[in-house]
Image: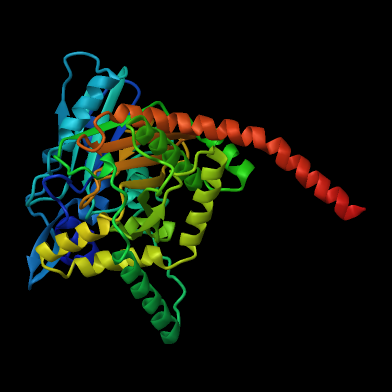
Amino acid sequence: MNRHSRLAAPMTRRDYAWHRMDSDNNIMVINSILLFEGPLDMERLVATIALRLPNYPRFTQKVQARRGRPHWVEDEQFNIEAHIRLEKMAQDVSQEALQGHLTRLAHQPLEGGRPLWHMTVLDRVNGGHAIVFRVHHCITDGLGLVHVLNHLTDDNGLHCRAPSPAGHPHSASVVQNAVCSAVGRGITNLKIALHVTRLSMLWPDARTPLKNPMHGEKQLVWLPPLQLERVRAMSKRMGVTLNDAWVAAVSGALRIYLEERGQHVDGRALRAAVTFNLREKANAFQLGNEFGLVAVDLPTNIGDAVGRLRHASARMTAIKRSHQPRATMAFLSIAGFLPVPLQRFALNLFTSKGSVVLTNIEGPGGRRYLAGSRMTDLICWVPQAGKLGVGLAFISYAGQIQLALFVDKEQIPDPERLMELTYAAFDELELATRELAPLRDGAAAALAELGSS
């Protein structure tokens, strides 16, 4: 379809809530960086993006009110080159300089009145080049963003103009969920309403430096990647998920970080808002936001690494079986109907219940190439909303896991330390589960022998 023939489409109230969620302290932009080997061919890069990215209508549309309701409307003045800027570096960029560069970009709101995304291309990074890809959250969530990245890139270096037909947004079909009966839907809606009520009545989270008033000065940091197989093996030993291990590691890191700052950590557990996908993966091409934020009591008050992992797994399993994820997604849909001051009040009420945001994104499983250049690393930072100013992200890519931290410096003045502690917490979990594995295997063998006698 010619993009100029696309009709205006109503914006979902949930996406509209994200569109209006920007504040002085928190900009609702997903920041990511794609690192590539080899020299930059800017002309080829722009031509590839110009051919593929407009296959998703949201990247050529702007938000506009029509008949009192927000719509996605085609930007008749859309020019791809206005959304892709080359920044030539005077010398090779170190990681410290790159983090500073990214932090500067993360403070800048996206320009209004046009499609809400932007790419900054850096030509001298780690002997190759990089793309800072910034997308407003109202366009998509993490799962949708990964779909976009897969469509922009190829699975080998033999670059051609046409993208892979697999999952192409023009030919993909929507996977329909099973339709419940009217009675089933009514019961589900009642449970969702009860969860919304329960969440609104939770006590605000414990007072720690993580609840300091934000000043809006942000910083993005990351560390070298972990090997995915290493974390997967550790999770398998304990019969837990990768996300359970992520929650346990962050809990251990926060426990030590706060303890180092004189906080009492053995009392009340901290609470996190953890993202929970509610979309069929096959429907990610539709973009938009289809996830819930679940309130999880982190096991920060447990000193033992294995104990933290077991508690994290039990709490995440209980939430998966509840209607809490759909309750928070419903809350965002309701917020999109409210006047802006009321939406902000409701958002502040809900975000006061936690201290950090945690997200886990499943990225491309194999190596990807853009305009013939191999992508070596993919890093993504989760934005925060309302009164939350600390966000930790975990994204997998081609056999590795990248940990990234995005914070308000009034709450975490030394984010590098928290990142180091998170990395170390994975080491602690791996060692503890390795030591436990022989004991578990021995107990299982003894039980089997008793059962056969």
Residue situated furthest right in the rendering: 453
Q: Is residue 339 left or right of residue 242?
A: left
Q: Which residue is drawn at 31% across and 71% down?
A: 197
Answer whether residue 156 is visible to the viewer in this image.
no
Image height of 387 relative to 89, above or below: below
Q: Residue at x 43, y 37 (%)?
A: 397
Quadrant for the N terminus in the image: bottom left
Q: Count the marks: how many?
A: 0
Q: In this view, does 69 lie to the left or right of 444?
A: left
Image height of 433 relative to 275, above or below: above
Work out whether residue 209 or residue 322 is closer to the camera in this orientation and state it. 209
**Picture coordinates of residue 72, whole percent (x, y):** 16, 61
**Picture coordinates of residue 196, whole percent (x, y):** 32, 69
Quadrant of the image occupied by residue 442: top right
Work out whether residue 164 or residue 299 is closer to the camera in this orientation and state it. 299
Answer whether residue 204 is visible to the viewer in this image.
yes
**Picture coordinates of residue 229, whole percent (x, y):** 55, 35
Q: Is residue 108 left or right of residue 395?
A: left
Quadrant of the image occupied by residue 154: top left
Work out whether residue 118 or residue 248 is closer to the camera in this orientation and state it. 248
